Amino acid sequence: MPNTAVANVPEIATPPISPGQAQVSAATLAQQMQGAIQAISPGTTAGIDVVDMRTGDTVADLNSGQQFYTASVVKLLIAIDALKSQNWQPDPGTSGQIQQMLSTSDDDISDNLWVQNGSDDIVNRMIGLIGLGGTTAPGDDGEWGETLTTPRDVVTIYQYIENSVPEPSRDLIMNALRGATATAADGTNQYFGIPDAFPGYTWAVKQGWMDMDASTTLDTTGLVGPSFDPLRYAVVVLSTQPAGTNWTVGGAALTAGVALLHVVMY
């Protein structure tokens, strides 16, 4: 069920751009991002990997090899697997399902494709196909959101989509991510993190959110760039937040952290 409790969320201001700050190290910038996240959601552990897709340079890096729950970010793997099973030439029905699953984060479609295509086998096939050294299938094969992955592996997934998925499947995925709706199929605001931190920029995102007994998962992932250099950067911030964290508060925390990337994306 959506986490709908009312919460007071600090207003997030975009930090001023200072070209000199662009020289900050990847580790230092990521530490600053985690600090901004923890200021709003204390007790959060963040995993951060930000990569320049053009040069391959790492822009921010913290806990990039540590596993976090994917929540709905695993829908990227569900989509790639379904498309590959049709030799990258999806029929209209599958195309429509994937577009809706990714753009609105539709869980019902995910459930259907997950069961239809082999549940855990999907993750295991994608680990081999893409080369995901830090990803493991869920312990309960009925809970796709409990797939574990690392920020580094999520960047690798975006690199695979951009560089290895053939057309028209690549266009289908990217158009769905660029068209992510403000409100998800379950009623959640999915514009936290990258979308809220980068108004006016081009972005293509897959977000994730999930409550468990011991923790709350909130993830913001995707490609983003200024209008003159669209989708240049892969941005992945996965987080384990304290159990019961309100999603509005947790999302605002990720937005505050991601907003610090303005110092390098201008």
Image: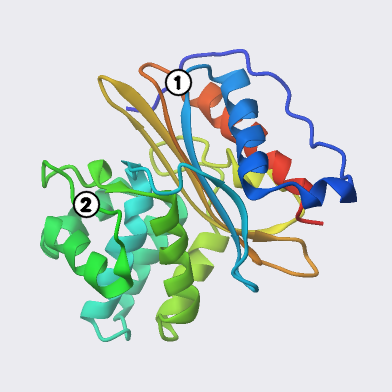
- Which quadrant does the C terminus fall into? bottom right
Q: Name the spot of residue 78 as percent of width and height, x first.
A: 28, 62
**Residue 24 circle label:** none
The answer for how far apart the CA atoms under marks 1 and 2 are is 30 Å
At label 1, counting other C-alpha atoms closer than 10 Å, the crowd grade (few under 14, some 14-19, many 20 or more) is few
Q: In the image, is residue 117 above or below residue 41?
A: below
Q: Are marks 1 and 2 in contact (CB under 8 Å)?
A: no
Dot 1 or dot 2: first in sequence order is 1
| Residue that numbered label 2 is attached to | 136
* Vertical arrangement, residue 144 with respect to residue 76, above or below: above
Q: Who's the residue at 66% across and 40% down the image?
A: 28
Question: Which amino acid type is shown beneath numbered disc 2?
Answer: Thr
Quadrant position of residue 254: top right
Q: Nearer the viewer, residue 56 or 186?
A: 56
For mark 2, give the secondary structure.
Answer: loop
Question: Viewer-proximal residue, 11 or 30?
Answer: 30
Q: Position of residue 154 (x, y in %)?
A: 42, 57
Q: Amino acid at mark 1?
A: Thr
Residue 255 visible in the current orientation? no
User: x and y percent of residue 97 in the render?
Assistant: 32, 64
Percent across and percent down for residue 215 are: 33, 23
Q: Is residue 126 above or below residue 247?
A: below
For the point 53% across and 13% down, the residue is 6
Q: Residue at x 62, y 27 (%)?
A: 35
Check disc 1 and report the residue beneath it.
4
Q: Is residue 259 left or right of residue 118?
A: right
Kind of element beneath mark 1 = loop
